[in-house]
Image (spheres, helix red, strand yellow):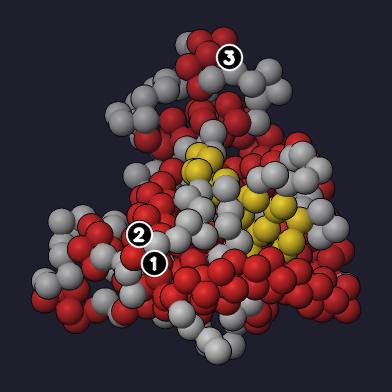
Amino acid sequence: PGVIFSGIQPTGVPHLGNYLGALQQWRRMQDSAAADTKLLFSIVDLHAITMPRPRGLLRQWKREMFAALLAIGLDPSRSIIFYQSMVPAHSELQWILSCTASTGYLNRMTQWKSKLSLKDNVSLSSNEAKQTLKHGLFSYPILQAADILVHRATHVPVGEDQRQHLEFARECVTNFNHTYGTSCLVAPETILSPVKRVMSLRSPLQKMSKSDADATSRILLTDSAHAIKNKVLKAVTDSQDGISYDPVGRPGVSNLVELASYFDAAGRTPEQLVEAEFGAGVSLKALKNRVAEAVDAELAPIRERYAEYLAKGELIDRLVEEGAEKARESAEGTMRLVREAVELGA
Ligand code: AQP
């Protein structure tokens, strides 16, 4: 029996990139998993505090994320949905793992550099890093490893940008098991989403992101048909005529073609779609209209369910408690073995 684990930061309402790159796959895995597969999906609030954010919003963002996960089709009677901070074993295991994790390895990770807008070749000892890097952001991958390992997950569905962190989690397993002469931690397999990266509608060389200052760069799961249309019609493209698929030379247009392909009922690749439907004479505006309609058709039922769930405050309160209880039980089984191996506790 397998264990599937994944997480998302409560840093705002999820966007189309989160949906296509992660959430849609979570739902599909839930719906197709064997009956004895355990599924856990965490709203990782401890990760969300690694970056500065406006105060007073975290609780609201967590509830919104919970409602969004229900709205996209996660079923709390099948999947354990929980707030990370309500399961203290995640932090406990993080500390234990940090005692055998390599700083050199963390130094090579790219996420802390991109979050601080530093170049990929910047190192921990640079002046820029010394001035801006907080320890929590630097050790983010250790907490992520703990999230996964504390439930002895066998499969972790994530977007391409998280591949490095999964390799690091496997390294944590090797270090821990070797140091303590145990096999109690399990190396997880990465399940890469078939959707690579959905790019920002304003700067198509960057991924669509919750924390981009420009709200028109992303489509939220809660956007109205009107808002979706506006954002897609204003998406940055280029000055060439016609439509072609060339992610390097024409990133903006190619991002739209990819979106059209993700929602294509016939499942055609971007290349096939351009060949079959976007030949000479088809305008960029026609492509944009098609994308806006397809996105709205997918998101309309989700945003309706989202509003319904968000209005049911008591239901969410109850599901939050139940999810945390189940996740604590799941984590505790592993922690007993870990404490025993490390000689912690009584
Ligand atoms: N643009 C994207 N395209 C495809 N997949 C994406 N993911 C994020 N952005 C894209 C996937 O969403 C999952 C959850 O991500 P996260 O909330 O943990 O944080 P993130 O990857 O840092 O996403 P954001 O939206 O950019 O949030 P902020 O701005 O808060 O950092 C992951 O599986 C990720 O691959």
Q: Nearer the viewer, residue 1 or 129?
A: 1
Check the picture and name the quadrant holding the C terminus: bottom right
Q: Is residue 269 above or below residue 239?
A: above
**Residue that appears at 51% across and 22% down:** 270
* Mark sitting earlier along the chain (3/2): 2
**Residue that appears at 68% across and 58% down:** 40
Front of the two marks 3 and 1: 1
Check the picture and name the quadrant holding the N terminus: top right
What distance separates the C-alpha of mark 3 from that of mark 1?
59 Å
Disc 3: residue Cβ within 8 A of ligand 1's nearest atom: no
**Residue that appears at 59% across and 43% down:** 20
The crowd level at tag 2 (other Cα within 10 Å; few <14, some 14-19, many 20+) is few
Q: Taking the image as drawn, is residue 137 in sight?
A: no
Front of the two marks 3 and 2: 2
Q: Amino acid at mark 1?
A: Tyr
Give residue 131's mark: none
What percent of the width, then of the height, locates residue 154? 57, 48
Q: Amino acid at mark 2?
A: His
What distance separates the C-alpha of mark 2 from that of mark 1?
6 Å
Callout 3 secondary element: helix
Q: What residue is shown with label 2?
A: 178
What percent of the width, then of the height, locates residue 121? 15, 56
Contact? badges 2 and 1 (CB < 8 Å): yes
Q: Taking the image as drawn, is residue 33 in sight?
A: yes
Q: What residue is shown with label 1?
A: 180
Q: Is residue 119 left or right of residue 206?
A: left
Give residue 277's mark: 3
What percent of the width, then of the height, locates residue 119? 19, 58
Callout 1 secondary element: helix
* Mark sitting earlier along the chain (3/1): 1
Q: Is residue 228 left or right of residue 140?
A: right
What distance separates the C-alpha of mark 3 from that of mark 2?
56 Å
